[in-house]
Image (cartoon, helix red, strand yellow):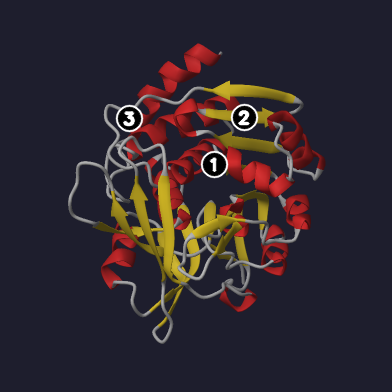
């Protein structure tokens, strides 16, 4: 029996985030993980979204209920009461140029037994945060969708004895051969490929078989590469920056939502930049803006690129 888990199915771990931002004395606690931010972005732009994940008994029921009430399919989120959910501390510098990221509690791996039998989605987005997904699971997910998307951030992290994040390659590079769309930061691209030249590193990813490469660069925007051509996508300016957590995840969520509608890739990237500019105006995963405002900002950006 085939199980439809949203036109965009996001696979990865939730996290319980403790966020410290400039101008706010109190630590803010929020549901995090790429699955959270990406699924909300997909749904905000009108596509159906679902999540495949594994959480511990410490994840509040209210968090999953919120996703359910927003129309995100959480039926494939497995709760194991004896386990714990990943927890991170995030602390930003006064100008948001630096972020301290510390893992305070490791979650559990997502195995083949956690993938619903007969899963089928138009796009599956693989988004690990602590290396919790194996090559074998990604290989299986490839057979469950028309297009496979990847954010490799969780494959590029290791943790020291105090939980502080350092960069290192923690996955079989063959995973790129399974992927159609890959979104990552510039630093992650360099770690993944071992190249410090941007164009050369992107070529390595394409040569592995990836059709669409998106490199996010924070306030500098993003670079979109496909069919041998690279496009600079400017960052859409937010009205205020409160918390940049999840901006890259929102970018790819909006991108995939428009991609499924058959839109031109430059438009998809414009929508991604616009959606990312809105999420940073709130703190944690509390604010994603309205579709109308995302589209308005995307149109302004797209007209400059067309």
Q: Nearer the viewer, mark 3 or mark 2?
A: 2
List the single residue furthest toward the left.
25
| Disc 2 secondary structure class | strand
| Quarter of the rendering occupied by the N terminus | bottom right
Q: Quadrant of residue 139?
A: bottom right
Mark 3 neighbour class, 10 Å CA radius: few under 14, some 14 to 19, many 20 or more: few
Q: Earlier in the sequence, mark 1 or mark 2?
A: 2
Marker disc for residue 256:
1
Q: Earlier in the sequence, mark 3 or mark 1?
A: 1
Tell me whether circle 1 and circle 2 mark residues in contact (CB < 8 Å).
no
Q: Is residue 246 visible?
A: no
- Residue 124, above or below 180: below
Mark 2 neighbour class, 10 Å CA radius: few under 14, some 14 to 19, many 20 or more: some
Q: Quadrant of residue 262?
A: top right
Q: Residue at x 45, y 19 (%)?
A: 301
| Disc 3 secondary structure class | helix
Residue 116 in percent (x, y) is at 57, 72
Give the residue number, with chain letter if any, for mark 3.
292
- Residue 96, above or below 30: above
Disc 3/disc 2 C-alpha distance (Å)? 24 Å
Q: Nearer the viewer, mark 1 or mark 2?
A: 2
- Residue 143, above or below 296: below
Mark 1 neighbour class, 10 Å CA radius: few under 14, some 14 to 19, many 20 or more: many
Q: Residue at x 41, y 55 (%)?
A: 36
Q: Quadrant of residue 15?
A: bottom left
Disc 1/disc 2 C-alpha distance (Å)? 13 Å
Marker disc for residue 224:
2
List the single residue furthest toward the bottom.
82
Q: Earlier in the sequence, mark 3 or mark 2?
A: 2
Disc 3/disc 1 C-alpha distance (Å)? 17 Å
Residue 146 in percent (x, y) is at 68, 50
Residue 207 in percent (x, y) is at 82, 40
């Amino acid at each position: 029996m085939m199980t439809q888990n949203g036109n965009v199915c996001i696979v990865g771990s939730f996290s319980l985030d403790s966020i410290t931002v400039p101008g706010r004395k109190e630590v803010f606690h929020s549901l995090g993980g790429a699955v959270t931010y990406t699924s909300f972005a997909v749904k905000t732009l009108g596509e159906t979204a679902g999540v495949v994940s594994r959480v511990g008994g410490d994840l509040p029921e209210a968090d999953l209920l919120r996703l359910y009430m927003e129309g995100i399919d959480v039926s494939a989120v497995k709760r194991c009461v004896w386990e714990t959910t990943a927890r991170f501390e995030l602390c930003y510098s006064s100008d948001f140029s630096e972020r301290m990221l510390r893992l305070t509690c490791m979650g559990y791996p997502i195995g083949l037994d956690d993938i619903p039998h007969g899963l089928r989605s138009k796009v599956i987005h693989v988004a690990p945060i602590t290396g919790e997904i194996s090559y074998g699971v990604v290989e299986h997910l490839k057979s469950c969708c028309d297009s496979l998307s990847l954010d490799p951030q969780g494959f590029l992290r290791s943790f020291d004895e105090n939980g502080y994040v350092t960069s290192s390659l923690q996955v079989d590079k063959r995973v790129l051969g399974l992927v159609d769309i890959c979104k990552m930061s510039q630093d992650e691209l360099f770690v993944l490929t071992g190249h410090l030249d941007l164009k050369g590193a992107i070529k390595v990813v394409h040569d592995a078989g990836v059709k669409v490469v998106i490199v996010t660069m924070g306030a500098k925007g993003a670079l979109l590469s496909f069919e041998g051509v690279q496009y600079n996508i400017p960052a859409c300016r937010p009205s205020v920056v409160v918390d940049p957590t999840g901006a890259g995840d929102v970018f790819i969520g909006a991108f995939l939502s428009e991609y499924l509608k058959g839109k031109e890739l430059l438009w998809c990237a414009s929508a991604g930049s616009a959606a990312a500019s809105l999420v940073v105006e709130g703190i944690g995963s509390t604010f994603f803006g309205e579709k109308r405002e995302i589209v308005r900002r995307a149109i302004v950006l797209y007209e400059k690129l067309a």
